[in-house]
């Protein structure tokens, strides 16, 4: 009797394992080529946002600081900075476009001096044109941006698992990750804008006198705005793919079929 119970339990265990394997195979086979194509198209959209996000975070053309040209000299000073690094440049006024009152743009050739911020190492503030950064705000912008990239990488991993392993339950997780990463990138941009305003207001009282400055946001920040919007759009597309078909779907003819 004992041996018969043992063999019966062993047979039940084998049948259960076989049923689970069949269920996994069926769940993976449920993804139609049309659905897989939609997921890949949404992944292509989010990859564009991911590229823009990495480009924005890794470059230092978020904002340009420009002095005025009427300084009685043949050269003028400009600077550009991002989350990690700032560069000051001395430009020839002859190279500055005619009709421009301020020095720049920063892409012009000139004598450049680039240094990394010391917010995360020694905790020192940076000094630019007799103005001092507010390191707490700059640190917050950088940390939020890096967190956004980390969440974006997690979303990419989830979608890759969906396509390779058929784990469609991760599709919703990936959608949330991409939407959250886009939101974090946009929040980082807004925090950076506050850091720029704080920099313009923190004028050093020590001589020499601080020069008059203007600032304009540059192409790195534009890449960040585009990345945030595209990532949120991609997250919305993935989220739509997780929803059940609506009551209007039978009314819409499928691709490749003609409406009667």
Image: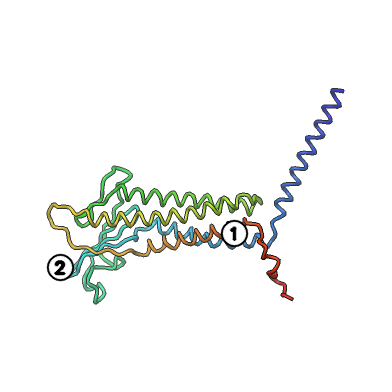
Q: Nearer the viewer, mark 2 or mark 1?
A: 1
The location of residue 215, given as percent across then percent down, is 27, 63
The location of residue 62, given as percent across then percent down, is 34, 60
Give the answer, above or below, for where 89 lies relative to 29.
Answer: below
Q: Quadrant of the N terminus?
A: top right
144 or 239: nearer the eye? 239
Say left or right for 243 vs 258: left
In percent of the image, x 40 and y 54: which residue is there? 187
Q: Residue furthest front?
A: 247
Q: Is residue 111 visible?
A: no
Say left or right for 164 vs 80: right
Which residue is the site of mark 1?
240
Q: Is residue 204 visible?
A: yes
In percent of the image, x 74 and y 51: which residue is there? 26
State the mark number for residue 71. 2
Q: Secondary structure at mark 1?
A: helix
Q: CA distance from mark 2 to mark 1?
A: 58 Å
Q: Quadrant of residue 201?
A: bottom left
Say left or right for 244 vs 95: right
């Amino acid at each position: 009797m004992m041996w018969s119970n043992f063999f019966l339990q062993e047979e039940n265990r084998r049948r259960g394992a076989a049923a689970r394997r069949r269920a996994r195979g069926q769940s993976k086979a449920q993804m139609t080529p049309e659905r897989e194509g939609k997921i890949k198209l949404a992944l292509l959209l989010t990859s564009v946002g991911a590229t823009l996000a990495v480009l924005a975070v890794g470059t230092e053309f978020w904002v340009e600081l420009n002095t005025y040209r009427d300084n009685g000299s043949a050269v003028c000073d400009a600077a550009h900075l991002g989350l990690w690094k700032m560069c000051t440049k001395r430009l020839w006024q002859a190279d500055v476009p005619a009709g421009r009152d301020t020095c720049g743009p920063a892409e012009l050739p000139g004598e450049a001096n680039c240094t990394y911020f010391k917010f995360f190492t020694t905790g020192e503030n940076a000094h630019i044109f007799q103005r001092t950064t507010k390191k707490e705000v700059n640190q917050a912008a950088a940390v939020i941006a890096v967190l956004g990239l980390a969440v974006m990488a997690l979303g990419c991993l989830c979608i890759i698992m969906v396509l390779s392993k058929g784990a469609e339950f991760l599709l919703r997780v990936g959608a949330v990750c991409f939407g959250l990463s886009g939101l974090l990138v946009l929040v980082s941009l807004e925090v950076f804008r506050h850091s720029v305003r704080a920099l313009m207001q923190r004028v050093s009282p020590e001589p020499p006198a601080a020069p008059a400055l203007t600032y304009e946001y540059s192409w790195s920040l534009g890449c960040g705005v585009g990345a945030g919007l595209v990532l949120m759009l991609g997250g919305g597309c993935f989220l739509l793919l997780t929803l059940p078909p609506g009551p209007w779907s039978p009314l819409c003819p499928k691709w490749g079929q003609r409406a009667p």
